Amino acid sequence: MAEIRFDSYSPADTIEIGKKLGAALRGGETIAYRGGLGAGKTTMTRGIALGMGLPDIVSSPTFAIVNEYCGDKLRLCHFDMYRINGADSLESTGYYDYLGKNTVIAAEWSENTEGLLDEDITVEIQQGSEEGHRIIIITSDKELDI
């Protein structure tokens, strides 16, 4: 299992890290986010979308549960799992309908779906030692060129 650590000191840094990850994705990946409220999960997803070549403006999926961003070759489905509390609840989001080889899933609050997602990338965002500092740890089952 590969693990890469980044330090981010601003939302712009987090977007740049996300762009690197997004450029390494080929479709079929599930990204499980771990991190508290305001950690930068949606900001990271903005970067991932840009790295995937998606032109859309990424917004938090809190109220919609899922936001879908489509490009010519890949799509990004950004889920908020905060209110998910089991397999039936996950299924009711339509999660399984979004899976596919041309789709990347980015799931915020994946702690609530422990054991339900077939995640192959974990992005953990931790508060750093000073205000605005984030430690971003990307763990993957496969080698990522980032």
Image (cartoon, rainbow, N blue to C red):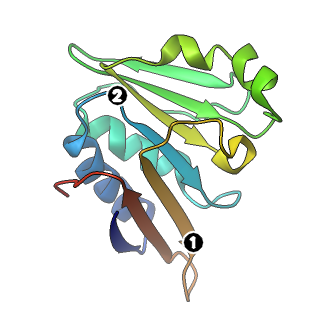
- Residue at the far bottom: name it: 129
Q: Nearer the viewer, residue 103 or 61?
A: 103
Disc 2, SS: loop
Query: Which tag, 1 or 2, sits closer to the chain's start?
Result: 2
Snapshot quadrant of residue 49 = top left
Q: Relative to 1, is 92 on the left or the right?
A: right
Res. 55 mark = none
Q: CA distance from mark 1 to mark 2?
A: 26 Å
Q: In the rendered view, tell whether residue 73 sits above or below residue 123.
A: above
Residue at horizontal 66%, vertical 35%? 80
Q: In the rendered view, tell whether residue 106 sits above or below residue 41.
A: above
| Residue 69: % across, % down | 41, 20
Number of marks in picture = 2
Three-letter code for the amino acid on which mark 1 is drawn = Gln
- Mark 2 lies on residue: 28
Q: Nearer the viewer, residue 72 or 142?
A: 142
Snapshot quadrant of residue 143 = bottom left
Snapshot quadrant of residue 36 = bottom right
Task: Mark 1 vs mark 2: give the one in front.
Answer: 2
Residue at horizontal 42%, vertical 75%? 9
Instruction: Check whether the beta carbons of the residues at disc 1 and disc 2 lie within 8 A of each other.
Output: no
Q: Residues within 10 Å of mark 2 (few under 14, many from 20)?
A: some
Q: Relative to 121, is 86 on the left or the right?
A: right
Residue at horizontal 21%, vertical 44%? 24
Residue at horizontal 28%, vertical 42%? 22
Disc 1, SS: strand
Q: Relative to 124, is 1 on the left or the right?
A: left
Three-letter code for the amino acid on which mark 2 is drawn = Gly
- Mark 1 lies on residue: 126
| Residue 83: % across, % down | 81, 35
| Residue 56: % across, % down | 37, 25
